Amino acid sequence: MKREIGIRWCCALLGATSLAAHAAFGDIVDDFVLATMSRHHVVGLSLAVIRRGEVVKANGYGFSDSGERIPVTATTLFQAGSISKSVSAVAALRLVETGQLTLDSNVNTELRAWKIPESEFTKLQQVTLRRILSHTAGLTVHGFPGYEMGVAVPTLEQVLNGEPPANTAPIRVESVPGSHWQYSGGGYTVLQQMIVDATAAPFAESMANLVLNPAGMSSSSFAQPLPKDAASRTATGYFTSGKPVPGRWHVYPEMAAAGLWTTASDLAEFAISIRRSWMGLPSGVMSRASARSMLTAQQNNDGLGVFVVGTGRQTRFFHNGRNAGFDAMMTERLASGLGAVIMINTNDDTGATNAIWNEVIRQYH
């Protein structure tokens, strides 16, 4: 398979020796990726490596569709699953910067078209944006299975209320907000309604304006389903059994929680932009204050839209994602700027993406 080594560093700064060493790192990683895919039965994979805060490698491996034998390239679109939450969180923080949303107010004061039903729990504490972003709002619905192509897809309000044709329960407060950590895709679906209300625009359009375009994510979209011209560049999803997802992939009206279509390179640019914001550089996607809030752990190593682990130079932020037929991971270390995005069109429970990340650490750090 042809290897594509994407290097954006300045040759004058690195020198020929460094470039040769980098190419050698890339070759070793390529070999490791292909061996890991074979061992773990991964159909297709897209990898972007970040070093010193720049994308230094972007490559595709295997097939976007095993039956058609279509190869994965650096521009093949994958579903990001729950990494969508990280991108949605940045949009929310940008709206906080402009005063259109607030972090610590009762979200019902900012929701217009729909509101969270009051309960015995909300009498004690309020659901706030900070708690939604950090999974401490006490809201129900862990995740979403999506909808097969061709079946009826619910509106956002039907998802929030658990009304047909929604295939998940109503999103409600089931514990005292702020009392403990409880992962909730439902909370991010409430956030989706908040962003729609605050911007008075369709969610996918607002996300393009708030995050995708400023972060340089030119191939990405929250449109569900994708328009035909973009759909032609998508990978087919495969379950752990190896069987393809009927219709190639599921539709997710729960866009803020699981609706992002993207490439590994675009997600790498997003991670880089978060780090640049944290450093206070003007090229970041949000203010330094917002980035510092995002990367401050609240409970269970959960910041605002990303998880934060490690200390000192080893501190890194990350998020994983899974949709029907797709797995992904995004991570970057704050001090060194070493990171990676790995996207596969296979649901894998054997640790393939973690193994590849560990190899990236060995070869590039």
Image: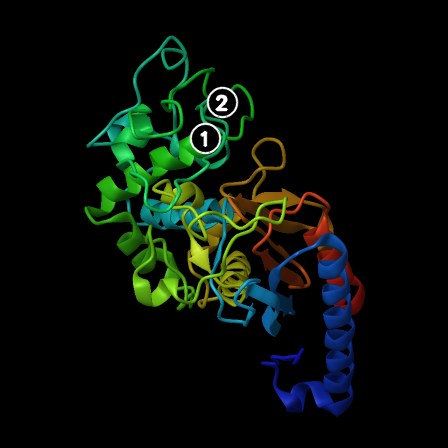
Which residue ends up furthest to the front in the rendered image? 67
Examine the rendered structure and indicate whether residue 167 appears above or below residue 270. above
Quick check: marks 2 and 1 in contact, CB under 8 Å?
yes
Percent across and percent down for residue 181 are 56, 26
Mark 2 lies on residue = 178
**Viewer-proximal residue, 180 or 247?**
247
Using the image, tell me which numbered label, if any, was put on residue 29. Answer: none
Residue at 59% from the left image edge and 31% from the top image edge? 299
Percent across and percent down for residue 249 are 45, 50
Residue at 34% from the left image edge and 57% from the top image edge? 226
Residue 119 in which image quadrant:
top left
The C terminus - image quarter: bottom right
Q: Secondary structure at mark 1?
A: helix
Q: CA distance from mark 2 to mark 1?
A: 7 Å
Give the residue type at disc 2.
Answer: Gly
Is the residue marked by circle 2 packed among few (<14), some (14-19), or many (20+) residues within 10 Å? many
Residue at 19% from the left image edge and 46% from the top image edge? 200
Q: 227 left or right of 246? A: left
Q: Earlier in the sequence, mark 2 or mark 1?
A: 1
Mark 1 lies on residue = 131
